[in-house]
Amino acid sequence: MTEALTYRWWLQTTNWWPQTARVDSSNKAGYNKAAMIPQDLLDMLVCPVCKEPVVLKNGTGLKCGKCRRVYPIQDDIPIMLVDSATIDPN
C-alpha cells in the first residue's frame, strides 16, 4: 500500500477522533443547536462577576440572569470576559 492509502485505511479503522468533536446532525452528542456548544459545558459555565449560571440567549450569547450581562459567542466559543460583555436592559 502507498502511504496515502495506508493513512486513509488507518483513519477509517481507528477511533482517533474524540467523540465530542464529531459533527452530529442528529444532535446525539449533546450539542446545543443554536450554537455548537456542548450541553455539559453550558452546565458548567457561570458568570465571572456574580458566579450565577448563564443561559443561552438566541444562540448569540450567554446571559446571566442576576447581573444581566450577555457574554458573546464567537466561532462557537463563549467569550467569558467581563470587558467583552454587554448589559441587557431586559
Image: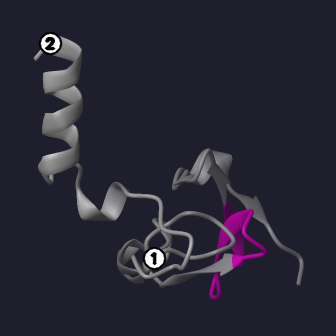
Looking at the image, residue 51 sits to the left or right of residue 81; the answer is: left
Q: Secondary structure at mark 1?
A: helix
Q: Which residue is mark 2?
A: 3
Looking at the image, residue 12 sits to the left or right of residue 31; the answer is: left
Q: Secondary structure at mark 2?
A: helix
Q: Local crowd at mark 2 within 10 Å, few (<14), some, or many (≥20)?
A: few
**Colour scheme employed for the rendering of this structure:** one colour
Span highlighted in magenta in the image: 57-71
Q: Are marks 2 and 1 in contact (CB under 8 Å)?
A: no
Instruction: Identify which amino acid the numbered label 2 is placed on.
Output: Glu
Choose between 30 and 41: the one closer to the eye: 30
At horizontal 39% and vertical 76% (from top left) the residue drawn is 29
Quarter occupied by residue 78: bottom right
Q: Earlier in the sequence, mark 2 or mark 1?
A: 2
Q: Residue furthest right?
A: 89
Q: Which residue is mark 1?
A: 42
**Residue 63 at x, y = what percent?**
66, 75
* Image: 58 above or below 20: below
Would residue 48 be visible to someone looking at this image?
yes
Choose between 56 and 39: the one closer to the eye: 39
Would residue 16 be visible to someone looking at this image?
no
Looking at the image, residue 66 sits to the left or right of residue 11; the answer is: right
At horizontal 64% and vertical 75% (from top left) the residue drawn is 33
Q: Nearer the viewer, mark 2 or mark 1?
A: 2
**Residue 38 at x, y = what percent?**
43, 71
Mark 2 and mark 1: Cα distance apart in space: 41 Å
**Residue 36 at x, y = what percent?**
56, 63
**Residue 32 at x, y = what percent?**
56, 76
Q: Local crowd at mark 1 within 10 Å, few (<14), some, or many (≥20)?
A: some
At horizontal 88% and vertical 84% (from top left) the residue drawn is 90
Say which quadrant the N terminus sits in: top left
Instruction: Identify which amino acid the numbered label 1 is placed on.
Output: Leu
